[in-house]
Image (cartoon, rainbow, N blue to C red):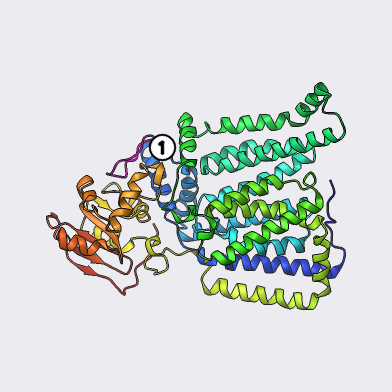
Amino acid sequence: MQTAQRSLPDPTAKRLALLLLAAAGCLFAAWIAQMNFVMHDMYHELALVREAMFRGELPLDNPFAFTPTVYPSVHHEWAMGLLLYGFCISTGWGLMGLTILRWMLILGIVSATYMTARRRGASPIVFALAALLILPIAWVGFGTLRAQLVTLLFTAVQLRLVDEDRRGRRGWVLMLLPLWFVWVNIHAGFLVGAGLLAIDTFERVAADLVNQWRQGRLGERRWLMRRLVHRYWHRVGLLIAATATLGLTPYGAQYAPYVLHAVRLPRPEIAEWGPLWTTYNPGLTLLSYLMTIVLTTVAVVQLGWRRAIGTLSLIVTAYLALRHIRHGSIYGVVWMCYAPPLLSRCKMGPAIQAWICQRQGAVQRGAVAAIVGSLAYFFYVGGWYTVLPVQSAEMGTGNQPVGVVEYLKENHFRGRLQLPFGAGAYVMWHMYPDVLISIDGRYEVGYPPELLDEHRAFYRGEPGWEQMLDRYPSDAVVVPVGSPIVDAMQSQLHWRLSYQDDAYLLMTPPDSPIVWTDRDRRGETLPQNFL
């Protein structure tokens, strides 16, 4: 297999490569710096682990809610909760443990991606420039702290192992088996790994058959079959093992049906599952996406698809990224592993490197400016620590109801609490078993999907909103600030506004047995009660 020269004997090229890699790394850190806030997902993962420790086994029911739930409740991220529990609670590190774990995973992703690309012949200069190009697409998977980070890390590691297999070192691929075992228990993104292996195997077999056809040997069926079996039997065995791995979770045979149901489930109300053009900055994102497609196409055309290994994986992940914002980070990892080597081996790779070296002065100044500016921005926005959003206007329903929970505890509240999708997990962690919730961010893991539609309709004040309170009687309702339902609840049902801050309100019924003391904390700085 033809590869680009990986060494850079020219000291100038070496220096420029290091500067550009450092600049790309700093720009990447600055790009994701504002994603240093706690995601609500981790709270339902922690609550599940705590309940499992209490029971001595993972619960198959959903004990946290008073609304309709599903059975069995297969939580495909249960081991992520165990990992978070170890880093944040068992150690006593709290938010610092969360920060350490997040950056360990990010460093692992970047390192594995770079090693894979370099192993395949990528020029460091081309890799650095490619990293800048993919940032507007890949950023979405790097929040604090989601199991998707593990999927990105394991995807990069798997691509590295598969590359060793391409070189005839099959022993490396055996490492996929323990990798998959851990992966399937941390995140259902394990399907990404199995799918990419299947795609890569299909691409290799297809290229092999085309080669034999050109040599006129397709008619030698017995010889051809022996060749294919000899070259790919271990791949087929791994794909069978991938299917069997679905049963290697505490949920046993119940895991596979859940996954098959979940991957087909539409999620129109969840923003990250929207198409790429609905992202926060569609112009820049779509321009970046189009450029990755154009550059990859040019490289494949110049090299020929049989030499452009990884093309099919790039096509499939590019399609997934276009369909769902959430998959942009998977496309980013695959693109960074496969595209820089392709670009380095085609005509444009040496041309880009020569152009950079001819303008070394301007490139050096630009790289240093990018490093200084990125680091300044990173520290300015606090990218080196983790925050719990409690009253940020930008976060909206992503704020955690810290003030509401404090108020409920002060009033010794016990009962059923209705709240929006993103706030349930925090209450679950802090107030279960005294408080049962109406919904949380697990979606299909714990609830029938139509329950989210009912919550959305209620908080929007759509016709018939009051029927939800009849179907699922609540002792109090948490309402995001600005929701139109507040005035309707006060005027039509005479519910009281008992508590308010800059993020959430608490509505209580007129016949509540608790004597609520009204409290207004608007304008106050709420504490970051993480755990």
Residue at (76% x, 26% y) in the render: 229
Secondary structure, magenta segment, majority class: loop
Amino acid bearing label 1 = Leu
Picture quarter with the C terminus: bottom left
In the drawing, does residue 356 fall left or right of residue 161?
A: right
Q: Is residue 527 above or below residue 450?
A: below
In reply to whether residue 299 is colored magenta, the answer given is: no
Residue at (45% x, 33% y) in the render: 251
Whether residue 516 can be seen here: no
In reply to whether residue 63 is colored magenta, the answer given is: yes
In the rendered structure, which segment of residues is drawn in magenta? Answer: 58-71
Q: Dot 1: few (<14), some (14–19), or many (≥20) neighbours within 10 Å?
A: some
User: How far from the left and from the top, in percent, is residue 382?
Assistant: 51, 70
Q: Is residue 73 above or below residue 289?
A: above
Residue at (65% x, 57% y) in the render: 110
**Residue 107 or residue 146, whichever sits in front:** 146
**Residue position for label 1:** 58
**Residue 524 or residue 230, whichever sits in front:** 230
Q: Is residue 102 above or below residue 12?
A: above
Describe the element under mark 1 as helix, strand or loop.
loop
In the drawing, does residue 43 fall left or right of residue 522?
A: right
Residue at (67% x, 61% y) in the render: 291
